[in-house]
């Protein structure tokens, strides 16, 4: 079934796709999790405010193109949104399967905990430093920030011209759109979240 413009339409598939019962609430939850108003979603997606509202209330079934635009604006996975079992599963990345890099810094091992599709957006790392290890980074995109929590040991964080020494359990939040670095004078482990604007 297609609309007048030839794009596929989800209406009429209600019996085959129970997701249509869940779609309005999933879109509304995604919008609220992002802290976005209906107007903001309309502006980001190119879908009218009234249409977004109707879809969220279950009064209108979106075309695939409209749904695609909404999921991109809300930064949610299109396939996951349509998966009726999406809320009933736990994705596990076993320790032995976590991607790791040891050449990006000096005497440190970086384990990538975030999924590949979040690269450049919201990234999560487990970083282990040997004595004297450091990770020096060039500025990320404008508005990027990092949040670092020391799991063990102690580190020094530098962001631009600001420097702070952190001990186990301390958390620092700092600009990552300037040159920044993490240094450990002894063995240390940190949990790092990078949020690009």
Image: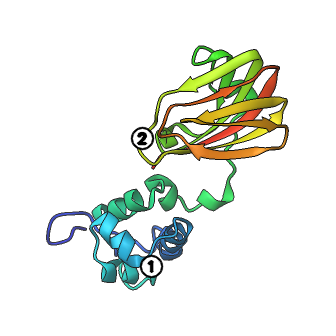
Mark on residue 56? 1
Where disc 2 sits, the SS reads loop
Mark 1: few/some/many CA within 10 Å (<14, 14-19, 20+): many
| Foreground: disc 1 or disc 2 | 2
- Classify 30 as above or below 173: below
Compute the Cα span from label 1 to label 2. 33 Å
Residue under the image location 38 percent in, 71 percent down: 40
Closer to the N terminus: mark 1 or mark 2? 1
Label total for image: 2
Where is residue 18 drawn, in percent x and y?
Answer: 51, 70
Residue under the image location 48 percent in, 28 percent down: 138
Where is residue 13 drawn, in percent x and y?
Answer: 39, 71
The residue at the far front in this view is 161
- Classify 159 as above or below 43: above
Front one among 122 and 92? 122
Residue 11 occupies quadrant: bottom left
Q: Which residue is mark 2?
A: 141
Q: Is residue 63 visible?
A: no
Q: Is residue 69 left or right of residue 33?
A: left
């Amino acid at each position: 079934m297609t609309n007048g413009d030839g794009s596929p339409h989800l209406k009429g598939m209600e019996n085959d796709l129970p997701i249509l019962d869940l779609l309005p609430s999933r879109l509304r939850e995604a919008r609220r999790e992002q802290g976005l108003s209906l107007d903001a979603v309309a502006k980001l997606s190119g879908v009218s405010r009234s249409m977004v509202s109707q879809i969220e209330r279950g009064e209108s079934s979106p075309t695939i193109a409209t749904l695609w635009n909404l999921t991109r604006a809300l930064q949610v996975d299109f396939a996951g949104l349509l998966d009726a079992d999406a809320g009933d599963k736990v994705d596990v990345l076993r320790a032995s399967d976590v991607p790791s890099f040891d050449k990006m810094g000096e005497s440190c091992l970086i384990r990538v905990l975030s999924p590949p599709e979040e690269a450049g957006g919201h990234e999560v790392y487990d970083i282990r430093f040997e004595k004297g290890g450091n990770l020096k980074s060039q500025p990320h995109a404008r508005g990027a920030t990092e949040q670092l929590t020391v799991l063990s040991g102690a580190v020094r964080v530098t962001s631009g011209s600001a420097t702070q020494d952190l001990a186990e359990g301390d958390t620092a939040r700092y600009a990552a759109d300037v040159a920044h670095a993490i240094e450990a004078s002894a063995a240390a482990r940190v949990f790092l979240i990078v949020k690009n604007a």
